[in-house]
Image (cartoon, rainbow, N blue to C red):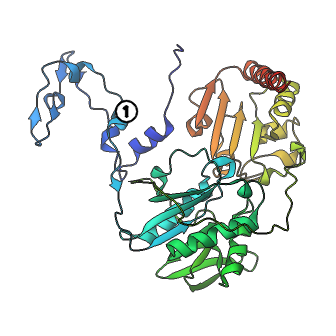
Amino acid sequence: MSDIIRRDPRAEWIARNRLHPLHAAMQVKQDSWMGPNGVIRKNPHAVGFIGPNGLKRIDRSGAQQGGGSSKRSAAAEVQLPLHQVTAPAFYIAVVPDMVGGRLSSHDRDLLGLAHSLAGSDGAVLAVVFGEHKESNFAGNGVDRLLVIEGEQFDGYAPEQRVQGLRAVDNQFSPRHWLLPDSRTGGGELGRRFAAALGERPATRVWQVKDGLSSGRAGAGQQDLVRNLPRLILAAAECADPVSETRHEALPVELSTGVARSLSRIEDLGPVAVDPAAIAMAEAEFIVSGGNGVKDWDLFHRATAALGATEGASRVAVDDGFMPRNRQVGATGTWVTARVYVAVGISGAIQHLQGIGACDKVVAINLDPGCDMIKRADLSVIGDSAAILQALIEAVDNFRNGARRDAA
């Protein structure tokens, strides 16, 4: 086992946020300490536990005193309150993009908006096409989960998915439909669905309040406010994601099958694209190098092996190791990658601002106390050259194994 201490950024954030329902549970009580005269003082209120009747009980087994409970174990014992809707008065239907088979930050914002529209009487119905890898629908505000499977929905099949949404509309009659106004499928699907229903959707919606929707218009220079329609195409950060309740995510099914449409579109599969040709603002997987990278040839070989788009910190650009159009940050390009790997980047405030919309951040650094480590979802403490070389070898072994299996 490694002796490296692993940090939990979410637990630390909850411990700092006094308004979060798990804040009290994340505080470690101090049982004893040394006084100014060198005498060990004990906290009598920390010994024992609260029984089922609300009475203070003393633990004579020593498990409470010697257990050394940590913040992480306290968080595991306390669960968020369960939000149940036994007989929904109405439904708010959400069709997430599910890029990569998982909920994106845009999808979670959409579910947060749906939860606010549902209130206490309605239920949030998530409609997912095909297989998925998401395991936390309940923690993101889904009351009912409808998975529509079938080979006709695989790949790029917007016409067939519209047929599926029409079947859902006929059975559940949602009060509102919410789709992400994105370039990854939701924007097109929402407009096609609106045309099929003969309704005028609200697009690029960033706020819903008092029965009105506010959407960006005029190239983003002005807002278009209108009565809240039935079909809403929402922008990112339209609402806060659900974080203080957990939901049932009960599976539901369509009572009737989905009619097959005569597709006028033939999906020829994905087209290989050079990661270096992808614009930074549109890249899904970015590996950025900073002042801690000493072997740039190795860095380029590692990004090529991973199939990632290259990025850099301002220091690396100023030193001439990377071109200016690859600079990430508030003074460079704001990125929205699903995975962002920071190699040897300490985490200046401008750089952290530029990666604020990234879903998952991986930090590789020698300094365990730098700001990038604090921001990262996964941290690897070690020499960047050794870690990049290990990544190249791991990718080569994986691909060689896949070729042997195919043969």
Q: Looking at the picture, does residue 127 appear above or below residue 178? A: above
- Which is nearer the eye, 150 or 297? 150
Q: Is residue 64 above or below residue 243?
A: above
Residue in the foreground of this view, choosing between 65 and 120: 120
Q: How many marks?
A: 1
Residue 274 x/y as whole percent: 90, 44
Residue 195 position, x and y percent, is: 71, 80
Q: Please state which of residues 321 and 403 is positioned toward the viewer in this rendering.
A: 403
Does residue 36 appear in this view?
no
Does residue 132 sit above or below 60 in this rendering? below
Q: Is residue 141 left or right of residue 188?
A: left
Identify the residue shown where x is 63% and y is 50%. Answer: 356
Answer with left or right where residue 185 lies relative to residue 236: right
Vertical order, 179 against 394 (above or below): below
What residue is pinned by disc 1?
71
Indicate the amino acid at tag 1: Lys
**For this rendering, which residue is in front, 197 or 139?**
197
The residue lying at 68 percent from left, 54 percent from top is 150
SS type, badge 1 = helix
State which quarter of the image contains the C terminus: top right
- Can I make out residue 20 in this image? yes
Q: Position of residue 353 (x, y in %)?
A: 65, 50
Q: Is residue 378 left or right of residue 250?
A: right
Residue 204 sits in which quadrant?
bottom right
Q: Characterize the local packing of mark 1: few (<14), some (14-19) or many (20 or more) Cα atoms within 10 angstroms.
A: some
Q: Is residue 208 left or right of residue 386?
A: left
Q: Position of residue 326 (x, y in %)?
A: 83, 45
Quadrant of res 372: top right
Q: Residue at x 63, y 77 (%)?
A: 215
